[in-house]
Amino acid sequence: MDEALWAVHRRNNRATRNAHDTFGAHRHRLTSLLVQAPGGRLAVLGAGNGNDLNWDELLGVFDEVHVFDIDEEATSHLRASLQKSTTRVVTHAPVDLTGIASRYAGWRSRRIAQEELAHAATDAVSAVASDIHGTYDVVVSTCLLSQLMHGARAMLGTGHADLRALAICLQLGHLRLLSQLLSKRGKAMLVSDVASNDDLDLQLVVNPQTAAQALAALTASGRCFTGTDPLQTLSMLETDEVLAKHVDAHLPLKAWVWNLSPVRSYLVAALTFARKTLT
């Protein structure tokens, strides 16, 4: 595990460790989508301190909840914060959910060869899958994509010439990972913050309809956070030979505003896709 990358995520998690209340509306929206599932085994990728989810509600629906994160300190905090001690929440850390972060140091001072990028998404899935055993009825990525991009940017530098190409690689690899972790009738939910109030006026977003309109305008203008654009995600699901063979996207996209603080808000998008039913 790259200590510098781990430190980046640890610092971010420590900054929001006591921010449980400010996650309230976001937590309600995300949890309400997940508890509509029929239950079984749930995998949560990138849970951090656990503020994104209502764990009591999840345990009312799912038999097992497995949590995967790079930051063992954060997952320990999550376990300590559970209102009821339970063996049905299993934490796994540290787990590098990019699968290729060990290569960042070598890429920092040079261009990334096209051949390396071409194989990186496949390599990433294999690497992460070796740390995540079995399949799950529901897999959710909780605002992790933007954190993966942030980690890559912190390690390679904001001026690296191949940062955008790497972001696309990380996005594709993450989608393939979610797909691979699904059980026969499994469902995946990719939830990501796609923009902040630095990018658009989120004060005008007051309900799901205006949130969807803001998301549509944002994607049309190409102003989403790098590697989080839902339209690009949909395109990957439909055109990537690995993904198109195994999963179908379920539309429409869900969108809402997450008011993290009086001065910081995010537009969040949730996309669901599921294992194809074989006939």
Image: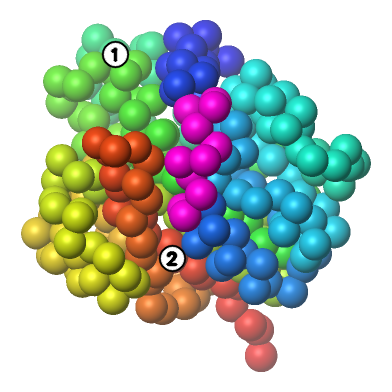
Residue 271's disc number: 2
**Residue 21 magenta-highlighted:** yes
- Please give the name of the residue rendered at 38% of the width and 25% of the height, measured from the top-left corner: 151
- Please give the name of the residue rendered at 50% of the width and 32% of the height, measured from the top-left corner: 19
**Residue 209 magenta-highlighted:** no
Which secondary structure type mostly characterizes the magenta part of the structure?
helix
Q: Position of residue 212 (x, y in %)?
A: 27, 70
Q: Amino acid at mark 2?
A: Leu
Residue 108's disc number: 1
Q: Is residue 41 visible?
A: no
Magenta region, residue range: 16-26
Residue farthest to the bottom, as pictured: 279
Q: Earlier in the sequence, mark 1 or mark 2?
A: 1
Quarter of the image with the C terminus is bottom right
- Please give the name of the residue rendered at 32% of the width and 19% of the height, measured from the top-left corner: 154
Relative placement, left or right, of 258 versus 9 is left
Quarter of the image with the N terminus is top right
Q: Position of residue 180 (x, y in %)?
A: 62, 56
Number of residues whose C-alpha sits closer than 10 Å to that of mark 1, classed few (under 14), some (14–19) or many (20 or more) = some
Helix, strand or loop under label 2: strand
- Please give the name of the residue rendered at 74% of the width and 45% of the height, measured from the top-left corner: 66
Quadrant of res 227: top left
Q: Is residue 157 above or below residue 252?
A: above
